[in-house]
Image: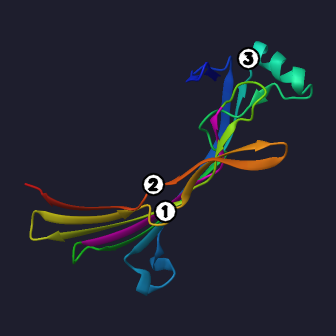
Amino acid sequence: MINSGELQYQNAPRGEVRGVELEARKNLAFLSDRLKGFSGGVNYTWVEPFAEIAAAELAFIRFYAPQAAATRELTGQSPYIFNFDLTYHNYRRGTTVSAYYNVFGRRLSQVSPPGTPNVIEQPAPTLDVVWNQRFRDHWKVTLSAKNLLDPAVEETYTYRERDYIRSSHRRGITTALGITYTY
């Protein structure tokens, strides 16, 4: 809630989250011998969250919209999350390369004061790649590149059935190089 230009956090009187999470991981050699060093994983979460709107706030909202629901989404909770990974591992050479993809559904970013539209964070898929190489007996080099898709991260709101962009930015691609010695 915003009051006198300040952002204030308030808990809803009651909230609830229901959902299901499914996960699978499999070595891909069952498809072909050429895929012997490959494995993949998928994770899907479906969530149905809601929070009750405080009585005073609901009375104000219903003054302008008499049919308004008494509940809303939970802030920061997506209705779905999807993760996928693919890994190549060569034990003999000490090489591992992994790619990770993640996307979440639109989610409530900010509950605005009654009479003004709430702010929604739109999906922004990510793709990360990590390469690990062991050498000698105790050394490992890691190279990673994260957020390769670099999508626009957007917050939007809807006013009179039209969508507007409140903010938009890109996080950028990050890379890292690490050397590890294990004794």
Q: Position of residue 16 (x, y in %)?
A: 67, 28
Amino acid on which disc 1 is placed: Asp
Residue at x 52% of width, y 53% of height: 169
180 is higher (above) or lower (below) than 74? below
Earlier residue among tags 1 and 2: 1
Q: Seen from this angle, which residue lies furthest top? A: 56
**Disc 2 versus disc 3: distance between alpha carbons?**
35 Å
Residue 108 counted in the magenta span: yes
Mark 1 Cα within 10 Å, few/some/many (few <14, many 20+)? some
Task: Look at the image and give the residue range highlighted in magenta.
Answer: 95-110
Q: Are marks 1 and 2 in contact (CB under 8 Å)?
A: yes
Q: Are marks 2 and 3 in contact (CB under 8 Å)?
A: no
**Disc 1 versus disc 3: distance between alpha carbons?**
38 Å
Residue 3 counted in the magenta span: no
Residue under circle 3? 54
Q: Note whether residue 82 is visible.
A: no
Residue under circle 2? 171
Residue under circle 1? 150
Q: Position of residue 125 (x, y in %)?
A: 55, 59
142 is higher (above) or lower (below) than 71? below
